[in-house]
Amino acid sequence: MPTLGFEYRSGLLHCDEVPLAEIAAQTGTPCYVYSARSILKNYEAYAQVRGPAPHTVHYSVKANGSLGILSLLARHGAGFDIVSGGELFRVMQAGGDPSRVVFSGVGKTKNEIDYALGAGIALFSCESEEELELIHERAERRQIQAPVALRVNPDVSAETHPYIATGLREHKFGVPLAEAPALYARAAHMKNLSIEGVSCHIGSQIFDLRAFEEALCKILDLVDALHGQGIVVRHLDLGGGLGVGYRREEPGPLIAEYMNALWKPLRGRDLHLHIEPGRSIVAQAGVLLTTVLYRKRSASKEFVIVDAAMNDLIRPALYKSYHDIIPVICSDRPAVKADIVGPVCETGDFLARDREMPAVETGDLLAVCTAGAYGFVLSSNYNARPRAAEVLVDGGAFTVIRERETYADLIRGERTL
């Protein structure tokens, strides 16, 4: 099973020491369930490794921004990678230290920049010349220096879904490698900018460690070129992107292997490494619980209709992604091949198609595995469906870290004529 912290005991699926059926009975479904132990184990695999250079782990908030998870990581010393002012707000509400926050993203607004400057974040990862100029202008108004790095696009191909690849020249992210020295030279003459480092991120769900190594070598060549023109950088931000396995037979690369691949080129260099993992910390530490509503058969197809839908977990519809789906209570029923679909009024509303699985009956509980990243955070109220509850399990106890939305929540802030 690719999902960490979840195992069968006496035929019942548990998260740590808590039976998932017990959580479903108290919270209802759909419900996201996360293992605090597994999240911390993954975070510490990054944070506690020792190498030839100091490093800081900035958890990528976009993977899962629930306050309970952010506060868990903040208490254990994590920094954070954000892509919006709202994510910065969430980090601070969860007790995160803004001085350990890196602000990424191609479209930072004036208000977001002002908010981040006022909070005192660690670094702006800038993605264009105009952004550098805007940050300089907003910092000048405050009579402070804004810490910046330029996100460089190394034109490295990462074998991943095209929607989550970010390192090629045709992508919107970063500036071309060849243009970076000139932009750094211009930034060096902006008195309200403090050049701290070089940033790079080539995509997500990457299994081939050679792609990271290739990008790092290109960035180190840029660092050398910058030093040659008198611009000394001490920080190297390599983003995240390490892949995780979504199938039983696809475990994915280990965090230790990834870190070792980064350490080799950094030996003998006076650089502080920043990394921004998200998916590899939380994905395998979470499941989505759902209840079977109906069984239905058409002329040529079997359907299992469940109460979780594409508004709860959009990855299968958006990316055609695969998630293992397993029963919460084991049975000896024969296997069936079926589409597992939700109640949303879209043919694209499916969690799995032509999936062979144990036969289920109305009322049975299923667990959609490896749902801790890009699950709830991408959910919506489409079809006026309240969003799911979220639960964090720590050993033998669990806490509801997000209440299930009500119908009243659906119209909060709206007005009739």
Image (cartoon, rainbow, N blue to C red):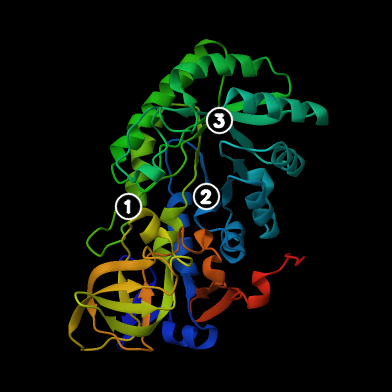
- Name the secondary structure under disc 3: loop
> Which residue is depicted at the point 61% across and 57% down?
74
List the residue tagged with mark 2: 60
Q: Residue furthest top?
A: 229
Which amino acid does the dot numbered 2 rest on? Ser
- Earlier residue among tags 3 and 1: 3
> Which residue is depicted at the point 63% across and 36% down?
123
List the residue tagged with mark 3: 127
- Earlier residue among tags 1 and 2: 2
Quadrant of the frame with the N terminus: bottom left
**Mark 3 near mark 1, Cβ–Cβ under 8 Å?**
no
Mark 3 and mark 2: span between their CA atoms? 17 Å
> Which residue is depicted at the point 67% across and 38% down?
109
Which amino acid does the dot numbered 3 rest on? Glu
Q: Quadrant of residue 216?
A: top left
Which amino acid does the dot numbered 1 rest on? Leu
Image position, residue 190 (x, y; %): 70, 18
Give whichever of 262, 120 is nearer the camera: 120
- Earlier residue among tags 3 and 2: 2
